Image (spheres, helix red, strand yellow):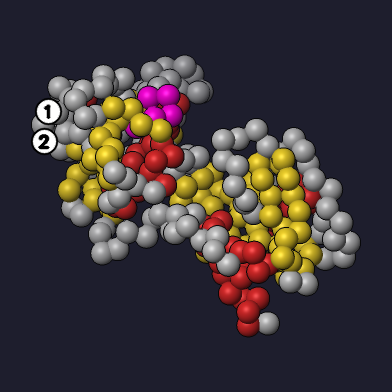
């Protein structure tokens, strides 16, 4: 999956350090990332390369012990560095830099959404000890938002439920997915999402694996389960353009090495060969 970047290392603990002119700077605007992108390879600008003062940088994380910063400024394009669609990061190389761009987008969105205190309206300040915004007026503390969500692979007698989202740019097959709601366990999220999206009950819910997904700020948790009882699908057309039972053998070449969804499709196929 996209976060699997070994032997490279990703360190996300916060450090209150000042950027230097030759440090990498992640810039975003309107769902795009400022980068050079040629023949599938991505490169990010330094502060010097785009003429941005290092003081405008916010420490994000490190990749292979090299600090990476982001900026909240709407930086202008310069030279090879132009605004590229975030989706290029799904397949861009080197993989460790693609992943850095995805996580950076998560942080950038959080910072933009937390300029003012939601409790009293005062302008928030950056904390110097941890990744947190605090309010000098009411002492409210705001940490990065991570949204738990599920990816669900439902099987029954050699078939699996595949879906396609409604009203989205992503038009490939997917599995049932959705965010956890307040007051429910993650297993209850699985049952509810399957019922809401395709109208069936499930049993034997088994956890598989998780994946951070910086495109949406989510933490995805994958589950396998089986249909329980009636298998006739009632598709929620507000959420899905398609939902259908598909022969599990069609999942043979679905894994793209990027998403938890696609890996689970491959695993479902491999399990079917052993049954």
SS assignment at label 2: loop
Q: Is residue 49 above or below residue 228?
A: above
SS assignment at label 1: loop
How far from the left and from the top, in percent, is residue 244? 76, 54
Residue on which disc 2 sits: 22
The answer to whether residue 129 is left or right of residue 178 is left
- Quadrant that contains the C terminus: bottom right
Q: Which residue reaches farthest front?
A: 39
Q: Residue drawn at (42%, 47%), measured in percent from left and top?
A: 90
Q: Residue drawn at (44%, 59%), measured in percent from left and top?
A: 257
Res 247 quadrant in image: bottom right
The label number, if any, that marks residue 48 in the structure image: 1
The label number, if any, that marks residue 67 in the structure image: none
**Contact, mark 1 vs mark 2 (Cβ under 8 Å):** yes
Res 79 quadrant in image: top left
**Alpha-carbon distance for marks 1 and 2?**
6 Å
| Residue range of the region highlighted in magenta in the rendering | 29-33
């Amino acid at each position: 999956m996209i976060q699997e970047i070994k032997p490279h290392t990703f360190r996300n603990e916060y450090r209150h350090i000042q950027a230097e002119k030759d440090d990498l700077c992640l810039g975003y605007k309107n769902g795009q990332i400022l980068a050079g992108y040629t023949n599938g390879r991505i490169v990010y600008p330094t502060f010097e390369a785009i003429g941005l003062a290092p003081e405008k940088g916010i420490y994000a994380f490190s990749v292979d012990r090299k600090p990476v910063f982001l900026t909240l400024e709407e930086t202008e394009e310069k030279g090879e560095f132009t605004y590229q669609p975030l989706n290029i990061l799904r397949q861009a190389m080197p993989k460790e830099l693609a992943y850095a761009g995805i996580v950076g987008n998560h942080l950038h969105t959080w910072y933009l959404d937390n300029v003012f205190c939601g409790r009293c309206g005062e302008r928030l300040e950056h904390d110097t000890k941890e990744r947190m915004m605090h309010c000098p007026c009411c002492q409210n503390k705001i940490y990065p938002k991570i949204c738990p969500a599920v990816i669900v692979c439902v099987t029954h007698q050699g078939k699996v439920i595949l879906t396609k989202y409604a009203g989205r740019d992503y038009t490939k097959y997917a599995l049932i997915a959705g965010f956890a709601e307040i007051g429910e366990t993650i297993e209850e999220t699985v049952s509810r999402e399957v019922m809401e999206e395709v109208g069936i009950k499930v049993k034997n819910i088994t956890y598989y694996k998780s994946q951070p997904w910086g495109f949406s700020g989510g933490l995805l948790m994958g589950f396998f389960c089986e249909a329980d009882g009636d298998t006739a699908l009632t598709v929620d057309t507000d959420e899905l353009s398609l939902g259908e039972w598909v022969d599990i053998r069609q999942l043979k070449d679905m894994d793209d090495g990027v998403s938890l969804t696609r890996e689970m499709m491959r695993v479902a196929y491999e399990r079917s060969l052993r049954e």
